[in-house]
Image: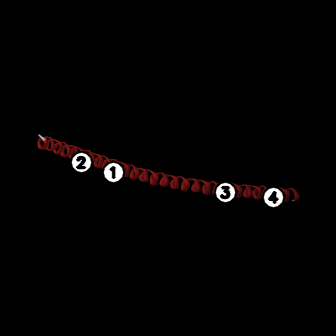
Amino acid sequence: AMTHQQEHCRQEVQQSQAQSQQVQAAADAHVSASSSQLQQAQNENAILRSGTDELKSALQAQQAQAEAQRLEMTALIEQSQRQQQQSQLQLEQARQQLLQQ
């Protein structure tokens, strides 16, 4: 009777060990899947981050270009105003000369 009970215990121990191994294997698979999901998420974040950086750089370049164009336009306007004043002055001098004749 003792050996029968011992055999029964041995089978239970084996069964419990097998279950424990299955649980461990499932846990390992889950950890592995989670870790690859995490890796994928990190990769996607890195891609998004670099995309955002590229957009920021492009935007800064556009802003710099717009600022340069604005300065250029301002310079042209100022030059045009100076030329207009010069023309006005020459016109005034010509009028004076005509009056003197």
State the residue in front, 34 or 61: 34
Vertical side of 17 occupied by 97: above or below:
below
Marking on residue 36: 1
- Disc 1 + disc 2, Cβ < 8 Å: no
Instruction: Compute the Cα span from label 3 to label 2.
Output: 81 Å
Cα distance between the residues tagged 3 and 4: 26 Å
**Mark 4–mark 2 CB contact (< 8 Å):** no
Residue name at image x 40 percent, y 51 percent: 42
Answer few, some or many: residues within 10 Å of disc 1's Cα (few below 14, many 20 plus, some between 14 and 19). Answer: few
Q: Give the Cα separation between the discs numbered 1 and 2.
A: 22 Å
User: Seen in the image, is 100 located left or right of residue 13?
Assistant: right
- Side of 69 where 42 appears, left or right: left
Q: Residue furthest right?
A: 100
Q: Kindly identify the residue that appears in the image at 78 percent across and 59 percent down.
A: 90
Q: Which residue is drawn at 33% across and 51% down?
A: 36
Determine whether the residue tagged by mark 4 lies in a helix, strand or loop.
Answer: helix
